[in-house]
Image: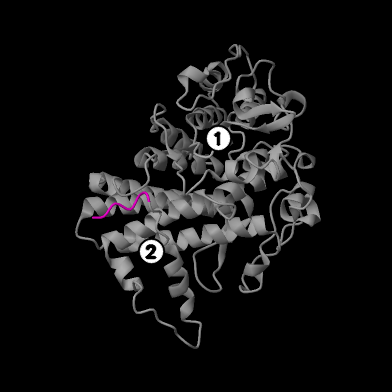
Amino acid sequence: MKNLKSRYIGYTFLFTIVAFSSACKKEYLNPNAATANDVLTSAKGLTGVTVGLQKNYSTTRAGILYATITLSGLTTNELISINTGNTNEERLAAGGVQVDGTNSVLLNVWAGANKIIYDADNVINNAANLPDKNYAAGLIAYASIFKALAVGNLSEYWEKVPAGTGQNVTFISRVDGYNKAIATIDNALGVVAANSISTSFLGNIPSGVDIPTTLNALKARYALFAGNYALALTAANAVDLTKKSTFTYDALNLNPIFEIATSTNNVIQPKNLNLGQTGANIPDAGDARIPFYTVVNTTVRINGFGAGTFTQFPIYLPGEMTLIKAEAYARQATPDLASSLTELNKIVTKTAATDPFGVGAALPALTGPYTQQQLLDLIYKHRCIELFMSGLKLEDMRRFNQPLADRKRNFFPYPFAERDNNTNTPPDPAF
């Protein structure tokens, strides 16, 4: 099979045409183009769609990676908007009623996530029919990563999420959305357990993603967000913390944070050296994660995973898994505060040299004793620092009951593109 990983083939555009062409009165055919049947029934075609999922998710200003980091960062005061001419970012920074269904950053998350779910479902459903079950396992598992991310992104920002794709779909609760992401991951893990991923498949996708480890990491994340602490702990323990799983970039597919913000200093930047934190949540003096994530060049600028054109961007950080364990121990029915503090101290004392990505606080250990609430407050503080510009902070602020006044919105209105075409669209939240 011809290697596809360096081309990031955009088969997803074909599916947009196929999905909506039935609503058109006239049909215009390109006799030289691949048909949907050709793409969905061949390993080569399905690989192209799968590789396209990563491109659509992780590159450009319209991609979900940039949009979720910007959406969460401006809403939670991690970031500031630099240029008043960037109307959509400016309105996110203003918050409240200034954010409505016309906002293009919101629409990029909503439309991009729903498109990825649609394409991923096509891969998952059709790969099962391929004769090479090991190659099919790779397709299903890889596509499931992006479907889970997309469902998770919708659940982080909206009170209710679509139950599926198509016209006039119904909606489910955001917790049901997280559980849907977990079910997608469980299916993929089962497929991989039955048939190991072939090396030929791995040679046809972009390097950087450790598929089984990433599936377990996302399962831990969404189980935590759904309040299933036992499952979150089990999944986090299944993640090999020595491994990295990243989006990689090349001359045709640039790191979107660097391309859009860092290189231009014209869209978003960190609010300050405190990462927008206030009061007891301000980073400790000497926290080595501050110079990792920021650099001072007249003003505070983006560093870390937005530092360069080809800087790899993590799908998850090993530190996130450790913090999930700390939180799960603290929140379970019978809190295990000793184990929670042990996990938290792994983050507090970790050095850059011992972290696969070079993220380390290098601070003295916390000694306690702490109450459950005190531990949860410390876990929140260190999540804000360890996971800076990860797009996860708004979910964290709600889960840790941070004051509404500390964020610009709690949930977001539904894009008009959805409301105008779906009578099942729920009412917008008040804030």
The image shows a total of numbered marks equal to: 2
The magenta segment: 1-6
Asked if the magenta segment contains residue 74, the reply would be no
Residue 2, magenta (yes or no): yes
Marks 1 and 2 close (CB-CB < 8 Å): no
Compared with 323, 306 (above or below) is below
Task: Name which residue lies at 40% across and 54% down.
Answer: 8
Left or right position of 282 against 220? right
Q: CA distance from mark 1 to mark 2?
A: 31 Å
Q: Secondary structure at mark 2?
A: helix
Q: On screen, 84 above or below 271?
A: below
**Would you call the spot at circle 2 few (<14 residues within 10 Å), some (14-19), or many (20 or more)?**
some
Location of residue 266 by image quarter: top right
Q: Position of residue 166 (x, y in %)?
A: 50, 71
Instruction: Residue 164 in the image: state x and y as whole percent.
Output: 49, 64
The x and y percentages for residue 401 are 70, 38
Task: Tell me the chief SS of the magenta region.
Answer: loop
- Identify residue for label 2: 122
Task: Looking at the image, tell me whether mark 1 or mark 2 is earlier in sequence order.
Answer: 2
Establish if 330 lies above or below 1.
above
Is residue 184 found left or right of 420 in the rendered image?
Answer: left
Location of the N terminus (image quadrant) = bottom left
Describe the element under mark 1 as helix, strand or loop. helix
Of tags 1 and 2, the one toward the viewer is 1
How many C-alpha atoms fall within 10 Å of the one at disc 1: few (<14), some, or many (≥20)?
many
In the image, farthest residue toward the left:
131
Amino acid carrying mark 2 in the image: Asn
**Disc 1 marks which residue?**
305
Say what amino acid the circle numbered 1 marks.
Phe
Which residue corresponds to the image point at 57% horizontal and 34% vertical from the top-left? 307
